[in-house]
Image (tube, grey):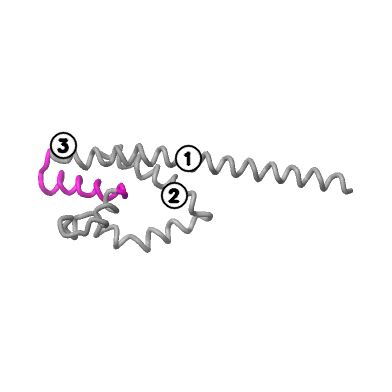
Amino acid sequence: MMIPYLLATSFLGLAASRYFTDSEAPLLMIAFFSVGLIFLSGVSYPMELMPWYWKLVHYLIPAAPATMAYVKLNSMGASMSEIHPEYITLWVQCAFYFVTACLVYRYNIRKAMAKSASLAITDDFSSHKS
């Protein structure tokens, strides 16, 4: 149960790194969205009463199905077969965020190579001027 959660969360973080330029921004985002994420988990507010678009967001965040599975296992005494939907959801998220993280890192590497190439050209021109 923890393996797909940790992998999906890690890959989501790597994929989201595309949108953050400094190391403090993700912490601010987590602090800002933490209360909403607690409600989206389905523990403090029932999933049955959520509108369809919040249910969709629920399935996009790895913490939401993991929290539901954890509550079912520990508080309700569920077996692994009873948390099968959450388990499959985490593995699907893991695969999706892995592919997304690979694409983001490919983009970042190409951007860094283009930047270093343009710096090399700039350095080459500046050496000819002197």
Q: Quadrant of the N terminus?
A: top left
Q: Does label 2 or label 3 sit earlier along the sequence?
A: 2
| Residue at mark 1 | 103
Q: Which mark is residue 16?
A: 2
Q: Which residue is mark 3?
A: 80
Circle nearer the viewer, 3 or 1: 1
Q: Position of residue 44 (x, y in %)?
A: 19, 59
Quadrant for residue 7, please give it.
Answer: top left
User: Which residue type does callout 2 highlight?
Assistant: Ala
Which quarter of the picture shows residue 11?
top left
- State the residue at coordinates (14%, 36%): 81
Q: Secondary structure at mark 1?
A: helix
Q: Position of residue 99 (x, y in %)?
A: 41, 38
Q: Residue at x 71, y 46 (%)?
A: 119
* Other residues around mark 1 within 10 Å, as few (<14) / some (14–19) / many (≥20): few
Reading the chain from its start, which is encountered first: label 1 or label 2? Answer: 2
Say left or right for 28 vs 1: right
Instruction: Please state if 117 lies on the left or on the right of 76 as rendered.
Output: right
Query: Which of the two discs, 2 and 3, sits closer to the camera?
Result: 2
Q: Amino acid at mark 3?
A: Met
Residue segment shown in magenta: 60-79
Residue pushed farthest left?
A: 77
Query: Quick one: 118 or 22, which is closer to the camera?
Result: 118
**What's the CA distance linking mark 2 and mark 3?**
30 Å
